[in-house]
Amino acid sequence: MTAPFAGASAAPSPAPAPAPAADREPVTVLGLGPIGTALTDALLRAGHPVTVWNRTAAKAADVAARGARTAPTAAAALAASPVAVVALADYAALASVLSGVDLGGRTLVNLASGTPAEAAAASADATARGAAYLDGAIMVPPHVIGGPDSVVLYSGPGAVFDAHREVLDALGGPRHLGADPGLAVLQNTALLGLMYATVTGFLHAAALTGTAGVRVEEFADLAVGWFLPSVVHPIITAAAPDVDRGRFPGAQGTLEMNRTALEHVIGAGDERGIDSSLPRALADLAARAAARGHGGDNFMSVLDPLRSPEA
Amino acid sequence: MTAPFAGASAAPSPAPAPAPAADREPVTVLGLGPIGTALTDALLRAGHPVTVWNRTAAKAADVAARGARTAPTAAAALAASPVAVVALADYAALASVLSGVDLGGRTLVNLASGTPAEAAAASADATARGAAYLDGAIMVPPHVIGGPDSVVLYSGPGAVFDAHREVLDALGGPRHLGADPGLAVLQNTALLGLMYATVTGFLHAAALTGTAGVRVEEFADLAVGWFLPSVVHPIITAAAPDVDRGRFPGAQGTLEMNRTALEHVIGAGDERGIDSSLPRALADLAARAAARGHGGDNFMSVLDPLRSPEA
């Protein structure tokens, strides 16, 4: 589950929910933080009967007023519907809440945050107790859940994904990544790492241009409005098939040339008195790739020391 | 000047140049590496009479066959045209080549690589010697120069930019950033830093998903085809005006929540045996922002320790 990210726009008030439709599968939602509340509202809007449970019962009042039924215990909530969407804080909370509860015949769609190994363990535990298990990662802020721009990654048995597709459609933008239950958390975690690298790279660049009085909004227009989508993304997309074949052709620019450019980034930062720890970390990785003989390859060869730090 | 980057597609053969047009301003090009050669071909295609000089004269043979005149010395090349486009390796090479040469009445458009302080010094030197000076940074690979997707950043006096606009148009996509001669190099350097952060962030993410057998091409489709343009760029664009006002509102997600997510990125990498030095560097910056009291602000507050590392 993605951490709600800095800078997202404010959440609108949820639209009133229609009365539950007779042909919609009943769904239970465990956990009513900002995410669980948004999931509940999305399900209510799609006409699903929804039963909710939260450790602090008072948090259920708002969604109850919008049509959700409240259950006094997690066990009662799980008994109320064939499928339960779990929006607890983490896998430890999931294990604690499910402890001693009969899961036979239920389907769990777990959207908790954690690591691939935790997802695999949760899947194994649920399956051993007679439940079907799907792991998921919400890739959008709470107010986007259920809307046309919602994206949720899922992993686990394709048959479970297909059986509850209508419920997953109500949450918005379901993408099934594969049967390995850890895949959704793994790809979500990888995307978060990419997000922090890109946003911090942007902030470093904004700090550098800011020393000459360039406004952040002005630099964002150049960097995000043009440079990343028009220059950087096509480079990555074009190089990816070669990377999959283990090929890093340097004919259009070598790692050594890019290491020189990185030294200019560090030099300009030092000249202007800003922090250069990010480009230094990038230069260190590039140096390790060069030390493995990739100096004449292209910059994508930095994948080598990233993949196998102890080679 | 941008370092030609890994993964760019191969250069097509230059189209045959038309005969020089009588109404086009004559241009001199100093330096005939891949960039200088591409600049020369773009000018020839636009009908400019072009005089070239390169320290190793043999490199001029190809562009001479396509219609460029060769000059035996840099001084002779500079005397041949009112404006000279400089594509030497760096500012030191520029200073060396111009040493003792009469620059009176000439306009220099310098596209060499370096730092803002070097650009400022080159501008001051040229101006003191009676020349007009424009500094520039080519943002695209050589084969794109002069084409519809070319972008070249310029800084220096607006009057100089306007006076030679036809020449700059022939090189493609001229953008004037302001009168400070260091601005083009500064913004180019900042964008390069952003590029390396984003590409390395992508490679780290690809290394992580690769441990589950996800192909790089498949992950690029998710990361570059959807996540960066649809999720990350709007976050940056939406936050920029607040950042310019020194505001980092945490209502939609705090730095502390994002620090927890970064720990998951590091944890997943450690679990899978890949290198986590990049997310660790990002987490360190976030920790320094938190130590300055930004824990309840949003992630953009990492700009604070980037801007003033010694605060």
Image (cartoon, coloured by chain):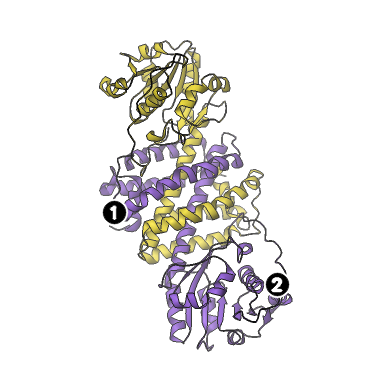
Chain colours: A yellow, B purple
Q: Residue at x 38, y 18 (%)?
A: A19
Which quadrant of the rendered structure holds the N terminus of chain A? top left
Mark-to-mark CA distance, 1 and 2:
52 Å
Disc 1 is placed on an element classified as: loop
Quarter occupied by residue A298: bottom right
Three-letter amino acid code of the residue under disc 1? Gly
Chain for numbered disc 1: B
Quarter occupied by residue A208: bottom left
Quarter occupied by residue A49: top left
- The residue under label 2 is B17
Disc 2 is placed on an element classified as: loop
Three-letter amino acid code of the residue under disc 2? Ala
- Does any portion of residue B270 appear in the rendered image? no
**Front-most of residues B201 and A69:** A69
Q: Residue at x 34, y 36 (%)?
A: A11
User: In this rendering, would A84 be left or right of B141?
Assistant: left
Question: Do the dots labelled 1 and 2 sit on one chain?
Answer: yes
Give the x, y percent position of residue B287.
Answer: 33, 46
Residue B58 circle label: none
- The residue under label 1 is B246
Figure check: B131 above or below B114: below
Give the x, y percent position of residue B222.
Answer: 54, 40
Give the x, y percent position of residue B26.
Answer: 61, 81
